[in-house]
Image: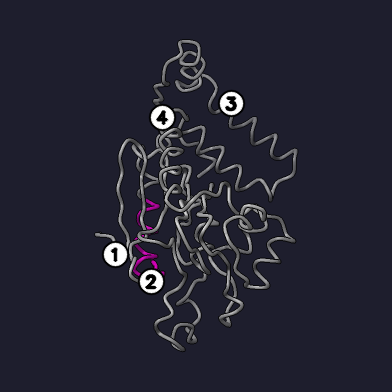
Amino acid sequence: MEPIDLRFDCDGGVAVITLDRPGKLNAFTGAMGRSLEQAYRRCDQDDGVRAVVLTGAGRAFCSGADLSGGADTFAALEQGSFSAAAIDFPAFQVRKPVIAAVNGHAIGLGLTLALQCDIRLLAREGRYGVVQVRRGVVPDAYSHWTLPRIAGLARAADVLLTGRTFDGDEALALGIASRVLPADEVLPAALALARDVAANVAPLSAALSKRLLWQSFALTAAEVEQRETALHHHLLGRADALEGPVAFLEKRPPRWSSSVGRDWPKEER
């Protein structure tokens, strides 16, 4: 299906997903959510995609839910017809590194979508906040799960329970941003990082590490050790585990051949 309110491009192993309603500061719509889910699923399944960048068109990343419906925006819905997840396949389920190039304001759902990504580069000039408690609803898109893992419980409470907004420098201090840059440098920096990942990181290794990283908070230290050991046994002796040291010693780019889809462990499905 042709994406709506969203653009999808892929080049050199890097997929770029652009939220595309610049005239509305990329306010989130149902059509945008369905398009984003399709784009994420495509990235997950396509071995040609090795890294993903999520960004916004124009001067904002995403200003949050489209509130143009006024009182009808958050009107009551029948049970089962609504999910606060926003999309059914969030960024943390994509088996590729997902980098949020937050090129400007990210408010409400705009920020909670970025929190689903693995790495976040934020514009210093932008305004950020999870403001839902100031709109009569609650934070969404898994933010009660993602933000405490990213920033810790105390800082998550500061953000989620007050609904206040803050700038890029405070986002960095809170631990929400991986890096803060001038707005016009955010996307180029994210693309440079994604291209480095696409060229040098073994796709299957990154996918397995990402899966364990997001699961690790629910595991004990002993369980993490067991999982790490099991994943090593899955990778050791495979083509990429042999190629990595040889490419390093020969001082050349690695030629990875393992497939995230084909070589994914059965127990991880």
Looking at the image, which residue is at 42% across and 38% down? 192
Per the model, the C-alpha gap separating discs 2 and 4 is: 34 Å
Per the model, the C-alpha gap separating discs 1 and 2 is: 9 Å
Residue 172 coordinates in the image, percent (x, y): 62, 52
* Three-letter amino acid code at the position of disc 4: Ala
Q: Earlier in the sequence, mark 2 or mark 4?
A: 2
Label disc, if present, on residue 29 of the rendered structure = 2
Instruction: Say which element carries label 4.
Output: helix
Label disc, if present, on residue 233 of the rendered structure = 3
Looking at the image, which residue is at 48% across and 86% down? 75
The residue wearing badge 4 is: 199
Per the model, the C-alpha gap separating discs 3 and 2 is: 44 Å
* Three-letter amino acid code at the position of disc 3: His
Q: Earlier in the sequence, mark 3 or mark 2?
A: 2
Residue 213 coordinates in the image, percent (x, y): 61, 43
Q: Nearer the viewer, mark 1 or mark 3?
A: 1
| Residue 134 placement: quadrant | bottom right
> Which residue extends farthest bottom?
71
Instruction: Say which element carries label 2.
Output: loop
Per the model, the C-alpha gap separating discs 1 and 4 is: 30 Å
* Three-letter amino acid code at the position of disc 1: Ile
Per the model, the C-alpha gap separating discs 3 and 4 is: 24 Å
Is 98 in front, or is 182?
A: 182
Does the image show residue 149?
A: no
What residue range appears in magenta? 24-41
Within 10 Å of the Cα at label 2, are there few (<14), some (14-19), or many (20+) other Cα atoms? some
| Figure quadrant of the N terminus | bottom left
Instruction: Say which element carries label 1.
Output: loop
Label disc, if present, on residue 4 of the rendered structure = 1
Q: Earlier in the sequence, mark 3 or mark 4?
A: 4
Q: Nearer the viewer, mark 3 or mark 2?
A: 2
